[in-house]
């Protein structure tokens, strides 16, 4: 498959671009976890579908970490001393093509972790070592004012759902459908946002 750049993306090829990323880069290690990047993202989508979430939430769960592949700052590692803002990189790639709910879930899934650490302190004990390391780079738990602001955003519940799927998607050896299984949902989401 031909490698496309972000600059050449349009509504007709963005899903192929995402499939290409999964094919080329999906086998990379996922942040010190016992799964690859593709396995992690596919597991997140699998759990959203298993829980009968709306199709658009399944799409958001699948794409939540796409910024690890598209960030101009590169991918995260356990030796990092600065945040790479993968959530913003992912949202930037998707925002022209996917509905606002998907973009919000991608952009806010890191803030959701910070929110949960502040609003439900026991949540921090559920995080993996890699997730705690990235949390520290990302600013730690939100402040009380930031918690209140986070709770007021339009897709609050869906963002927390995607976060929960993100946290669950780290199971070594779990068999899930592949990326091609979700391509019809992705194309449907793009068409809903951009028109046919």
Image: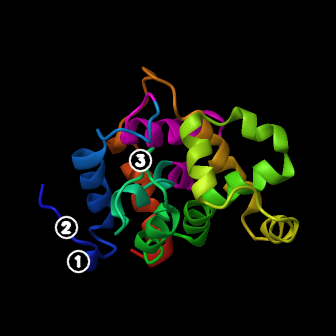
Asked if one can make out residue 54 in the rendered structure from this viewpoint, the answer is no
Measure the alpha-carbon separation of dots 3 and 1.
Answer: 29 Å
Residue sitting at x 39%, y 60%:
187
Q: Would residue 34 be found to the left or right of residue 15 on screen?
A: right
Question: Which circle marks residue 113 in the picture?
Answer: none
- The relative height of residue 63 versus residue 28 in the rendered view (above or below) is below
Question: Where is residue 81 shown, x and y percent of the image?
Answer: 48, 56
Taking the view exactly as shown, the residue that stands out farthest to the left is 2
Question: Where is residue 112 shown, x and y percent of the image?
Answer: 69, 56
Of callouts 2 and 3, the N-terminal one: 2
Measure the alpha-carbon separation of dots 2 and 3.
Answer: 25 Å
Label 3, on which residue? 77
Magenta residue check for 43: yes
Q: Would residue 2 be found to the left or right of residue 38 on screen?
A: left
Q: Nearer the viewer, mark 3 or mark 1?
A: 3
The range drawn in magenta is: 34-61
Question: Where is residue 141 shown, x and y percent of the image?
Answer: 75, 56
Asked if one can make out residue 69 in the rendered structure from this viewpoint, the answer is yes
Marks 1 and 2 in Cβ contact (< 8 Å): yes
Residue sitting at x 77%, y 49%:
117
Q: Nearer the viewer, residue 76 or 24?
A: 76
Question: Which circle marks residue 8 in the picture?
Answer: 1
Label 2, on which residue? 4
- The rendered magenta stretch, by its main secondary structure, is classed as helix
């Amino acid at each position: 498959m031909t490698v496309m750049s972000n600059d050449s993306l349009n509504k007709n090829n963005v899903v192929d671009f995402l499939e290409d990323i999964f094919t080329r880069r999906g086998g990379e290690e996922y942040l010190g976890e016992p799964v690859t990047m593709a396995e992690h993202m596919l597991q997140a989508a699998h759990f959203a579908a298993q829980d009968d979430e709306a199709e658009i939430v399944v799409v958001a769960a699948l794409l939540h970490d796409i910024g690890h592949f598209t960030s101009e700052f590169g991918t995260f590692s356990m030796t990092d001393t600065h945040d790479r803002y993968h959530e913003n990189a992912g949202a930037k790639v998707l925002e022209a093509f996917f509905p606002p709910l998907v973009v919000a879930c991608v952009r806010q899934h890191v803030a959701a972790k910070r929110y949960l650490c502040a609003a439900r302190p026991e949540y921090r004990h559920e995080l993996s070592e890699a997730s705690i390391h990235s949390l520290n780079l990302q600013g730690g738990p939100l402040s009380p004012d930031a918690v209140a602001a986070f709770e007021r955003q339009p897709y609050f519940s869906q963002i927390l759902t995607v976060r929960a799927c993100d946290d669950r998607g780290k199971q070594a050896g779990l068999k899930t459908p592949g990326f091609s299984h979700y391509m019809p949902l992705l194309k449907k989401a793009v068409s809903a946002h951009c028109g046919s």
